[in-house]
Image (spheres, rainbow, N blue to C red):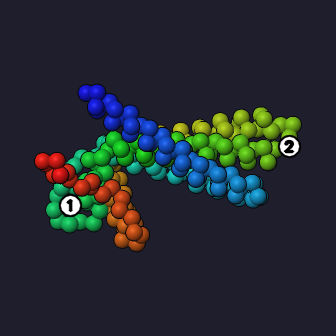
Amino acid sequence: MKRNNQRLGLRALRYAAVAFVVALAVAWPTQTATVGWPAFLGFPVLLLIILLGVAFDIVGVAATRAHETPFHARSATRRPGARKALRLVREADRVATVCSDMVGDIAGTVSGALTVGLAVRVVPARDAAVAAIVAVALVSALTIGLKSAAKGLAIRQADTVVWLVGRLLEAVERVLPLHILEAPPRRRRGGL
């Protein structure tokens, strides 16, 4: 029991460290690039970040809700994406952590910061604080509304969503030298 708690603690620390690095890697260029842009170009970037967070939230929820059974049959007939989809379902806790928590929360944080930056640039200085608060509230409402609708879709169509993501991952691996969701090598018994 103690060993499992230590593993969970280490995994949580690893996820936190990765989230920190990813947040810096996303927030830094987003903020520095949009500072020099006209404000109207920042709004499509903001919308893209919100939609990215919603899309990853859909994947995280669908992975926890999907069933293995349909993917066994598809995998046996070598249908594209079936093996990746099966892996997504089997690793649902990790997929949900990365997609919903890590990417979703980073997208929310970055969109909030970008919203404040855009509001301050668009509105005169004397009204900037109020405009930033209202803008953040509007972006929060939009994000929560979209995620609420998306979660319903992810729950109702979990197997379909997971299969589409499996196909997408497989297609990406064909083009790029990545190995997403590869099974770790099995340990041999006997200490080797």
- Residue in the picture at 43% in, 47% down: 99
- The residue tagged 2 is 124
Q: Position of residue 159 (x, y in %)?
A: 29, 51
Q: Nearer the viewer, residue 41 or 8?
A: 8
Q: Are marks 2 and 1 in contact (CB under 8 Å)?
A: no
Callout 1 secondary element: helix
User: Is residue 80 or residue 146 the one in the foreground?
Assistant: 80
Query: How far apart are labels 2 and 1 at the CA level?
Result: 58 Å
Q: Residue 6: give x, y in percent of width and height.
A: 34, 32
Query: Residue 60, can we see it?
Result: yes
Circle 1 Cα neighbour tier, 10 Å, few/some/many (<14 / 14–19 / ≥20): some
State which quadrant residue 150 falls in.
Answer: top left
**Residue under the point 25% across and 60% down:** 82
> Where is the N terminus found, in terms of image quarters?
top left
Helix, strand or loop at label 2? It is loop
The local crowd at label 2, few if under 14, some if 14 to 19, many if 20 or more residues have their Cα within 10 Å, is few
> Seen from this angle, which residue lies furthest front?
191
Q: In the image, what residue occupies the spot 24% across and 55% down?
A: 185
Amino acid type at image mark 1: Arg
Pointer 2 or 1: first along the chain = 1
Instruction: Residue 144 in the image: state x and y as whole percent.
Output: 53, 38
* For residue 120, side relative to residue 145 (left or right): right
Q: Is residue 120 left or right of residue 141?
A: right
- Rendered position, 91 above or below 183: above
Instruction: Report the residue marked by disc 1.
Output: 74
Please indicate, yes or no, whether residue 146 appears anywhere in the rendered image.
Answer: no
